[in-house]
Image (tube, rainbow, N blue to C red):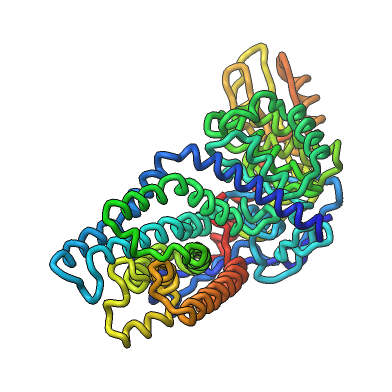
Amino acid sequence: MISVRHLTKHYQVHEKQEGFLGSLRALFHREYKAVKAVEDIAFEIAPGEIVGFLGPNGAGKTTTLKMLSGLLHPTSGDVTVAGFTPKRRQREFLTTITLVMGQKQQLIWDLPAADSFLVNQAIYDIPDDVYRQRVGELTEMLGLGGLLNKQVRKLSLGERMKCELAAALLHGPKVLFLDEPTIGLDVNMQQAVRDFVAGYNERHGATVLLTSHYMADVTALCRRVMVIDSGDLIFDGDLSNLVEQTAPQKLLKLEFRVPQSEAVLRGYGELRDRSELRAELRVARDRVTETAARLLNDLPIADIGIEEVPIEEIIGQVFRGRQAVRDAAK
Amino acid sequence: MKATLIRRLRLARVLFSVTLAAFIEYRAEVLIWMIAGTLPLIMMFIWMGLAANGPVGGYAAVDFAAYFLLVFIVRQFTVCWVVQPLSREIRLGEMSSRLMRPLDPYWMYVADHLVALLMRLPIVPPVVLIGLALTGAFVKLSIAALPLFLLAIVGAWLIRFNMHYTLGLVAFWTDQATSFEGLLFTIYMVFGGALFPINLLPPAAQEIIALTPFSYMIGFPVDIMLGKLSDAEVLRGFGMQALWTLVFIGTRQLTWRHGLKRYSAVGA
């Protein structure tokens, strides 16, 4: 559904002197600084997949998403989405995809969302019966009842995001690009958006590429993740592989009946967090069952849990590692 | 073919009615903008004062009254503020959500501006009629020229809107498009004839100005309504309006195509 090869985007950031004369000069003579936002990345996404796009701020996630949706022209490389070249922005392409940006809005601020919906109906040329059916479905899935006739500016952030999602999906796109769709929302609302995306993907077989700062979005929705850092695609595969590959340890959470000393615990693994009756140990993946057995045998254990290292920490570890390599190279 | 036409008409109707609804939310502001457009009326009083003791360059006080009241109409119905929002949307990346929809954002701005004209319809003509009655300038108008006057306003609007839209698109290259707008506005007001009738200038200057688009944005429709132009001059004027409209539509499209390649969709 989505095919990306050798995709590169360099921004020409021009440095301009201030004021009107500066602008006039900048019109004729400009000084540029190249910023490499995305550097030679490649991936394929199959129809119906939900893929999570991870990376720190400024890594190139949003730039990639914008190239996929045709907003940005790539510096070089090929992009195909549903058989179209995004930058040509043909009508058929734009009606096949949608881009939801958590920080941007398309709804008309001073009017009820229903009016913006009507505009979209006319722009996308959606027949009345299809329109009614879609509004009905989206109202049900997102719980929009009563929201559509309220002025957009009077909606809460979460309510507005739901209406934005609905407006962006009225034309029944097959490919969804979601850029931080849950940003700024409370936990319940994040959950609602997540459930909706999963439900929409299931019902319509839509392909979804999503970026988020909330790991919970990614772990809940995406089996596959792509990790991008400083414009390079550094991982593309199963979320579970990412965890195994970059976090060779597991987390043992212990509760004791009698306080344990630090010295004793250090013998079993990397001690991370300790209070009188609790401790967290990092233990190599292949030794975790053995270590657990030993602990149960040796110490007065009240409770024991084996968990994966939190995904936030893993990603953080990956990026810190790369930063260290870059710093060393300097 | 017919289906496309029906689709476009429906789109126009929806865009127009929704834009109107949004405008009504701002009706107080519309009134303030209109008050901000009263410069021609102020110029009218100044020139009427100067001509109180005898005609200036062939214009008596009553001629100035007719001239500037007509300038007021033309200015009000060719009002254009597209540079500011357009360049802001480009600079701040707000253009992105419009670009995701299969409709050139141009048409949304057209709808915006046309609705603003509609809002002025119940106010501007009565004000002008009262002005004409009070100054006795009614007799200076050539009523038979009314249809051509209206047509020339349409031409003036097309030149002005497309010119400004192109200027707004300059924001793809520089973030100072709005400072050029100030310069453009000054030239437009002077060359257009909003401060004084161009006829007061030496013939050589008049001929040069007649080559610029500005002549056809204010002075030309006004002179039609005052019955100052021969048939040949009217024909030539409409020809120049058509020419400049095509020039600016062309540059707008070219600027748009090249600008999109540079769009950096900042933010978000």
Residue lying farthest to the left in this orientation: B53
Can you give x and y, in whole percent of width and height, for residue A298 in the image? Answer: 74, 20
Which of the image's four quarters has the N terminus of chain B? bottom right
Q: Is residue A159 left or right of residue B169?
A: right
Where, by quadrant of the figure, is residue A204 drawn?
top right
Residue A277 in view, yes or no: yes
In the image, residue A279 above or below residue A101: above
Q: Is residue A74 above or below residue B203?
A: above
Residue drawn at 83 percent across, 57 percent down: A82
Query: Residue A80: x percent and y percent?
Result: 79, 62
Q: How many marks?
A: 0
Residue positioned 54% across, 60% down in the render:
A327
Query: Is residue B246 or residue A328 the one in the foreground?
Result: B246
Tell me where residue A113 sits by quadrant: top right
Q: Position of residue B129 (x, y in %)?
A: 37, 51
Q: Is residue A35 rendered to the left or right of residue B120?
A: right
User: Between B257 and A29, which is closer to the camera in this rendering?
Assistant: B257
The relative height of residue B148 versus residue A141 in the rendered view (above or below) is: below
Res B168 seen here: no
Q: Is residue B32 above or below residue B106?
A: above
Q: Residue furthest top?
A: A257
